[in-house]
Every structure is written in C-alpha cells, then in structure tokens.
Amino acid sequence: MSAPTLTRTRKPGVKSIDGTRASLAWLTVPALVFFVAFAIIPLGGVIVLSFMHWDGIGEISWAGFTNWASVLSDPLTGGSLWTTVKVILISCAIQIPISLLLGVFTAGFQRYRAVLSVLFFVPILLSSAAVALTFTALLDPNFGLSGAIPIEALKQDWLGNPDLALAVVVFVLSWQHIPFHVLVYQGGVRQIPQSLYEAASIDGANVVQQFFTITVPQLKYTFITSTTLMVVGTLTYFDLIFVLTGGGPGHATTVLPLFMYLEGFRANDMGGASVLGVILAVFGLGLALLIQRLGGKNRQASQLEGA
Amino acid sequence: MFSVLSPQRNRRRLAALTVAAALGITIAGCGSGGPSQTSGATATMWSLTSGDQPVIKDAVAQWNEKNPDRKITVEFFASDAYKAKIRTAVGAGQAPTLIFNWTGGVLQSYVDNKAVEDLSDLVKEKPDVADRYLPSVLQNGVIDGKTYALPMNKVNPATMYFNKDLLDKAGIEPPKTWDDIMAAVPKLKAIGVAPFALGGQTKWPELIWLEFLVDREGGSGVWERIQKGEPDAWSDPAVLDALKKIQQLVDAGGFQDSFASTASNSGSELALLYTGKAAMCLQLSSQFQAIKQGSPDFIANDKLGYAPFPTIDGGKGDPSYTVGSPANFFSVSSTASEAQKKTAKDFLASGLFNDSYTEGIIKTGAVPPLKGVDSKLGTAPDSEFLKYTYDQAANASTFQFSWDQAVDPSLADTLLTHLSQVFLKQETPEQFVDAMNAASKK
C-alpha cells in the first residue's frame, strides 16, 4: 500500500560507457516481478471478484454492480469507515507525541536509556492475538485488574460500553505499536548532526528551544515515514481487534478491515468482501498520497544545509 | 491428481488463492496451504484441537497399525482458524479426505456444491453403523433424505448449572418456571451475588437464552419457520416475548455487572459460579469439565447442581426440548480419489466408536451420541452428570442445533450481534425483529 514511492524514482537514464541505457533497465525486473505478482495481480483479482457472486465454495457467477450497490447502501460500510477514521485520528494523536518524546529520549547514549529502550521494545515482540487475550483477561470486570487492585475507577464495563470499547482498542493498539515508532524516531534523532546542537548552545539556546528549533524540524521526513506507517498500518489492524472485541459491542469497534473479514469469511460473501477490499485499497492509497503531499513538493531538498 | 482438474476448478482455485492473498488473511486463510496431496489410498483428516483430540489420535494410530497400506494422516486446528481454513480448502478443491464439520448451514453449502460424498450407501450396506447412533443426533447429518455426515464425538446439550450453597443461602429451590427465575433474582441479589453468570463478550451464550425462551414459549414451529426462510418469520409473538423476557431479566439485574466484558473462552463466566459470585449459569454440558478443571473441590464436595431450563407457564413448548451441539461430524470429500474415499468410509464404519473409541470419549468426561451408551457410563467419574446429559439428549423431543450454526453462515453473525445489542438494551425487541427479518430476506 505504500506503492506511490515507486513512481518517484524515475531519473534520467544513466549512460553506460557504450552509450546504451537498456542494460540498466534489467535491474528493475526482480522488483517489478515481485510487485506485479504480489500486488497488481491480486488487486486485479479482487476488482474482478467484486463484480462476482461467490460464497467461497460454489460456482463463481457474474453479479454486475449488485455487490457494489449492496455494500455501498449498507450503513455498516460507512459506519466501519468512520470507525476506522476515528481509530486513525485518535491513535495518531496519541502515538505521534509519545513516540517522538520517547524516541528523543532513547536516542541518548547513556546506559540507563539503553536499558529502558530495550524494555520499551517488548510489546512489539508479542503476537497481537496474545496481547488481545491478555488485555481481555486484564479488563475482566470480576477477575481482572479491578479484582486485584481495589480502585473503583478500574471497575468499568470496558468492552461492553461502546465508547469505552473504542478507547480500549485504541489504547491497546497504541501500547503495541508505539515501540516501533519510537525506534524510527530514535534513528532519526541520531542522524541529526551534533554540530547543530553545539552551535545552538553557543548561541545560548536551552534544551527546550533546541528541541523545537532543531530536533523537530530535522525530523520532518522521519515524521512523514512514521505517520505513513501508522496510518496505513491502522488500515490493516484486524487480528488484535478481532480477538479483543470481535468488532463489538454492536458494531462500535468494527473497523473496515474487520468488516471485510467478517463479510468474506464469516458471511461467506467474497464478492462483498472484495468490494470492501477495493474501498480499503483506494482509501489507503489516498491517505498515503495525502501524507506524502503534506511533506511538501520539494522533497529532495536537503535538511542539512550549512551543517 | 492436479492433471484431472477441470478448468472450472482451476478458476475457483485461482480465485481462492487470489482472495486469500489480497485480503491478507494469512493467519486463517491460506497459511500452510492444503493437506499434503499423498498418493494411493492414504487418506487425510482435519479435526479440532479439543478434548477429543487424544481419542482421535489413538483411533488413527490403531487404524494405521492395522492398515499399513492405506493409512490416515491427521492434522488438528483451533476452531476459529479451522472454520476459515476449511472453507478455503474446500473451495480450492484441496479439502482433506475426512472433513470435520458442524453440519447445519455449512454442510448444506458443501452439499449444494457437491463437495462432500453421499454416505447413504455406506449406511445401507452397514446398517449397524447408522444404528449405533441416537436418531436425533444422526438426523443432523441428513439432508434431503441422504446421509452426508456421521457423528464423531459427543452430545453437548445446554443445561442450567447452579451453585447449591448460594441457592440454600438465599433460601430458594432451583427455578422450575420463568416466574421462579424472576422471584429468585431479588433474593439472590439480597445476599450479594449475581443471579446468573453470562459470558456476554463471547455472545453465543446469550443465544442459548433466546433459543430456550422462544421454544418454551412458542414450540419448535417458530424456529422451523425461521429456518425455512418464511417471510417475517422473526415477527412471531414468541420471539418478541422471549426478547422482552430477556430485557426484563436484564432490568431486574439478573446478570452480573458488566456482563458484556465477561468472556466465556477465558473461563471467567464459569469462575463466577464456582467462586460464589453468581448463583446460576446457562451453558453447554461440555462446560462441566471446565468447572471441574477450575475447581475440582467444587465438584468433589457436591456443590454443583444442574437442571433443565425452566418452563414458561402457558408456553407451547415441549419441556424436553433442548438445544446445543448434537455432536461434531465427519464428512468425506468428493474431490478425494476413489481409494482415499474407501479408506475414509471404512474408517468411519470401523474406526469410529469401536469399544476403545467409545471408552476414550467417555473418559474425557463426555457422552458419545450412541444408543444405550448410558449402561457404559456407570463406572466413569462423574457418572451421575454424564447420565443426566445422556437423558437430556436421548429423551429430547427436539435436540435443536445451535441457531448460529444451523442458519446460513451469512446470518449467524448478524443474529449474534443484534442479540448482544438486545442484552445491552441498545436495541428494542422490535428493532431486533425488524433487523432479522430484513437480514433473512437477503
């Protein structure tokens, strides 16, 4: 889904000594074959299937636009898209600041920071299904956290109240995915030349000033990369929500990919699921493009002038 | 084996692979492909990782020892993953020879697409095979008068469990009618316990309530009309009445607080019962083993009571009606070779429910779906409960298969979701009925 970067790499052909350009074109073949086989062909298949009736076992028959009509007129399609947007917005609002701050913190080379960054990294090593099951147990109103710690605020209907359930989903997703983005930001911070900070210190800038005038602007591309992964990643979250809430209560946490799964593999309507798949792909591509655009047109410009 | 595939099947296989790849459902869909396509008479079998797993493993091992030239290879899967995987495999013509299934809507779709063998000949040639089963259970594998699946494990009717100590403390008897239930609720709340434990997060335990209430109220005709797809069949007064009773019970505080956050599969629903936080629980009889595992003392000290679901005064239903899972079944794939099919059918006839198999099932604390098996239950641990379970199944006027499994798969999720909304009072009974009528039309 982060395909758009491919179109950006076209450059004037480099002339080899004997003046032919063709020889270099072969270098793209492995990547192209891989991309066509695992992205373009399945995507084409899904588009074709979105015009077919298929229950997963029987005959595949032509459906025309009936799948599209029924999916687009299903209030759940819009509902799950809106839930997806909510999850994206809230989880970005939580994940970006925390990842940035932790990334800056762990970029230091002190020993205790190294120890802490190893600890921060643990959640991403765990499987989503295991994380979801663990949180289900922790949130159990009788035998979970509220049973162990006598704090009244912990005794909530975490997964039965629609608003709380969505908050729980976002929290668990963030808990699991922040470590990855911390790592991305940590790498970004470590690439900022020390000389910038030295110059700023000499000019009398304090740590907070340095953070906002050097660190944050220098992390612009790291920010774009991390946010793209965050947003597009949200469109693929399925396993964790499936195990944690199953999309419930009602449809309060049914995000688009989960809805697609239920439609395809629970309701056995592959045509409808394919329509949702196409919508998901278009939506994801659109978002990825949008974020790339937000980065500004002059993307090749150096951030390190004068450094 | 690949060479004889029709172009049509190839197209389906391509479509199946495409969907699995594109939707990215690698965990469930196409993780490790189909069963290895072995040549000759070696049959393949897919089954579930449940309590019966060791029994099936032993049966297959015994079979392989006796039949070295036509062995069976077996693989076990977790339930949810299996549901998606088997469908992809059947759709792609890659099904195992012996297909574990739940009958109901899924078996119907296999039959519609000629994916499974008609076993009627086997049943005719070897009458003792069909004759060993309880007819109400065997019936589930029959579609349009032809047998497509044979039971392979245990009967699993739902029952009302209760904590004897808590009922004594509240000074009440196990409820026999709906009015008893409503009268018991305030008394149990007065001693500070939840009247009923409910795994609302798992959703299907809620369905057991609806199934019983609809039948007790309106008799089995109500569900028959719904299942036939008669228009507006959900509008039956019995359905509305059952839903109203459910909300009445919710309003009275009949279920534990935050029941929608309690999951059955984590065991916390039953834990409420044996830790003395809830007095009763409506669950499948297979959950007896989970209670025993969770608290052996609770069983050993005779604290666990059980009884059939209460009746409704003036209701039309037969009180012997029960609901749950009559058994799980094996079907034979029609894409297997003739030799493989023969191996599979012979295994169904002689490998299942021979003496050691039946004993093995009983030893896991379950009741095989066999006629007269109650005489073999006497020496088993918990034989009293096993005999009770046998009676529930054998004497049932109707042993209804869980609705979510019996209906077309596309309806099951809708049904469970809307019902959970009714329990949470986010939907009225009328809204439920309208939503289900609309969904059934599709």
Image: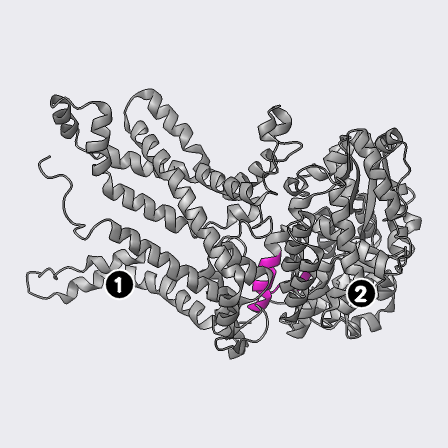
Above or below B247: residue A138: above
Residue at image mark 1: A29
Q: Nearer the viewer, residue B130 or B409?
A: B409
Asked which secondary structure carries label 2, the reply is helix
Amino acid type at circle 1 is: Val
Q: Nearer the viewer, residue B99 or A241?
A: A241
Above or below A143: residue B155: below
Indicate whether residue A237 is drawn in magenta.
Answer: no
Mark 1: few/some/many CA within 10 Å (<14, 14-19, 20+): few
* Range shown magenta: B83-100
Drawn side of residue A118 relative to residue A247, left or right:
left
Indicate whether residue B96 is drawn in magenta.
Answer: yes
For the residues marked 1 and 2, what is the alpha-carbon distance in whole angstroms?
63 Å
Could you tell me which chain the residue with mark 1 belongs to? Answer: A
Question: Is label 1 in contact with label 2 (beta carbons under 8 Å)?
Answer: no
x and y percentages locating residue B379 in the rendered image: 90, 41
Q: Nearer the viewer, residue B154 or B333?
A: B154
Q: Nearer the viewer, residue B359 or B101?
A: B101
For residue A156, say whether it is visible.
Answer: yes
Drawn side of residue A155 relative to residue B127, left or right:
left
Question: Residue B115, labelled with which disc?
Answer: none
Mark 2: few/some/many CA within 10 Å (<14, 14-19, 20+): some
Could you tell me which residue is drawn at 29 percent across and 21 percent down? A110
Residue at image mark 2: B222
For residue B67, say whether it is visible.
Answer: no
Drawn side of residue A299 relative to residue B410, left or right:
left
| Tag count | 2
